[in-house]
Each structure stands twice: as C-alpha cells, then as structure tokens.
Image: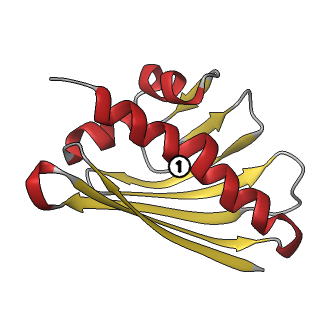
C-alpha cells in the first residue's frame, strides 16, 4: 500500500474551496459528472456515477476525512483533504490519500490532478463573488 501526499496553491479564498469540495452543483461543474455529497459524519459521497464512493468521517470548514473507494477495489482507503488561508487571499490545500493499492498508485495520483483537484482549482480560480 502507498500514500499520496500533495499540496496545491489555489488563488481563491478558503470558503470557495470548501464550497467546491462539498456542494453538489459545484462538484458536478468541475467533475463533469453526477455527484452526491453528504455533509454529516457517517454520510455517503459518490462521484462519477459511483466509480468513486465512500463515507464521510468528518466534514468541517477546513478538513474532510473520507473512507474512499474505487468501484473495483476490495477495501477502502483513507483521504484527508485539509486547507487553510494562504497569502494574498489564496488557499493552501493538502491531500493525503493513504492505503492506495500499489498497482493503482500511478493512476490514482494522475487522477487526483487531472480529474479532481486540477479541475476544482481551475473552477474556483475563475469564480467571482
């Protein structure tokens, strides 16, 4: 099992990043697919018609902790996405995704950037208040 640990500098305020991580309509904008996202501990989430799904262990204004699973995986992995205000009104976001099967690591690392955090970053940096 492997762990992915990446940091993004996002030129948008933290509340906008939180909204893009938790609001169904914004998730569907950056992902281009249907999504479900509960906001309570123990609630479920689903992205890309269930290809990625799991259970929210914690959803707060500066952190999301999830049991996270790709449809064909046997077991759940853990994702912790945390963020805080950075300089000049921006946000620093950190993803720690642990318990990734060795054979899936490269595709998961690429997928986070290409399909998840990269598009999310692009969306929130274009949004205006």
Q: Is residue 73 visible?
A: yes
Q: How many marks?
A: 1
Identify the residue position indicated by label 1 in the image.
42
Query: Which residue appears at 69% of the width and 43% of the height?
Result: 53
Where the N terminus falls, by quadrant?
bottom right
Query: Which residue appears at 47% of the width and 24% of the height?
Result: 24
User: In this view of the protein, which residue sits in the foreground, 76 or 121?
Assistant: 121
- Mark 1 crowd level (few <14, some 14–19, many ≥20, 10 Å Cα): some
Provide residue 32's location: percent of width, then percent of height. Answer: 60, 22
Please say which color scheme the image uses: secondary structure
Provide residue 88's location: percent of width, then percent of height. Answer: 9, 54
* Residue 3 in the figure: left or right of residue 61: right
In the rendered view, would you say 64 is above or below 19? below
* Quadrant in which residue 75 is drawn: bottom right
* Residue 34 in the figure: left or right of residue 9: right
Query: Which residue appears at 21% of the width and 41% of the height?
Result: 15
Query: Which residue appears at 86% of the width and 57% of the height?
Result: 73
Provide residue 41's location: percent of width, then percent of height. Answer: 45, 50
In the rendered view, would you say 17 is above or below 6? above
Label 1: state its secondary structure: loop
User: In this view of the protein, which residue sits in the foreground, 34 or 104?
Assistant: 104
* Residue 6 in the figure: left or right of residue 20: right
In the rendered view, would you say 53 is above or below 91? above
Where the C terminus falls, by quadrant?
top left
* Residue 96 in the figure: left or right of residue 22: right
Provide residue 98's location: percent of width, then percent of height. Answer: 64, 73
Q: Is residue 22 visible?
A: no
* Quadrant in which residue 36 is drawn: top right
* Quadrant in which residue 109 is drawn: bottom right
């Amino acid at each position: 099992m492997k762990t992915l640990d990446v940091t993004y500098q996002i030129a948008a305020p933290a509340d906008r990043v939180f909204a893009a991580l938790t609001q169904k309509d914004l998730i569907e904008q950056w992902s281009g697919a249907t999504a479900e996202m509960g906001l309570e501990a123990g609630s479920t989430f689903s992205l890309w018609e269930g290809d990625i799904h799991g259970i929210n262990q914690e959803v707060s204004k500066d952190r999301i902790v999830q049991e996270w699973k790709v449809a064909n995986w046997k077991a759940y992995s853990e994702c912790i996405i945390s963020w805080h205000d950075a300089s000049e009104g921006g946000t620093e976001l950190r993803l720690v995704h642990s318990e990734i099967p060795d054979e899936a690591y490269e595709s998961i690392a690429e997928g986070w950037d290409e399909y998840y955090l990269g598009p999310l970053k692009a969306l929130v940096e274009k949004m205006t208040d």
